[in-house]
Image: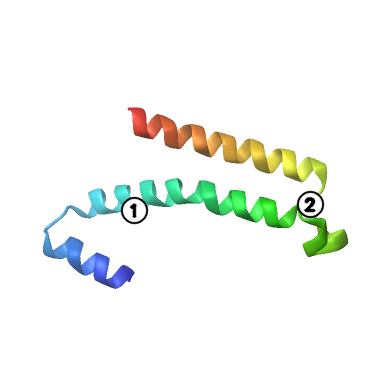
Amino acid sequence: MSVIAALAATREHAAPMQIIFWTQVLNTVLLVPQISALLLLNSNNQLLGEQTLTRRARVVGWIGIGIVAASVALLAVG
């Protein structure tokens, strides 16, 4: 899939730096739901038993997600 996207981008004669920029924007936007899902899965006692995240790890994880989500919101606004 990424090869097809790369071929399409080069066919349109897009600048390489512009392609890299928009790729990183997409990665950042997709990071929020991915990490949220991982935190929810790792917090499930029925799924992981004693290997679940500690309270501190969950708090730090959600703070990190909040920071990334805020950066995505700022990117969308300005």
Whether label 2 touches label 1, CB < 8 Å: no
Tag 1: residue type? Answer: Thr
Whole-percent x and y of residue 17?
25, 50
Query: What is the C-alpha distance between the residues marked 2 and 1?
Result: 31 Å
Q: Decide if residue 53 is on the left or right side of residue 29.
A: right
Q: Residue at x 85, y 62 (%)?
A: 49
From the image, tell me which residue sits under label 1. 23
Q: Decide if residue 45 is on the left or right side of residue 20.
A: right
Q: Decide if residue 18 is on the left or right side of residue 42.
A: left
Q: Residue at x 61, y 53 (%)?
A: 37
- The C terminus - image quarter: top left
The relative height of residue 21 versus residue 51 in the rendered view (above or below) is above
Q: Earlier in the sequence, mark 2 or mark 1?
A: 1
Whole-percent x and y of residue 73?
43, 32
Whole-percent x and y of residue 69?
51, 37
From the image, tell me which residue sits under label 2. 53
Looking at the image, which is closer to me, 8 or 48?
48
Tag 2: residue type? Answer: Leu
Q: Residue at x 82, y 47 (%)?
A: 54
Whole-percent x and y of residue 40?
68, 51
Tag 2, which secondary structure?
A: loop
- The N terminus - image quarter: bottom left
**Callout 1: few (<14), some (14-19), or many (20+) C-alpha neighbours within 10 Å?**
few
Q: Residue at x 52, y 46 (%)?
A: 32
Quadrant assignment, res 77 = top left
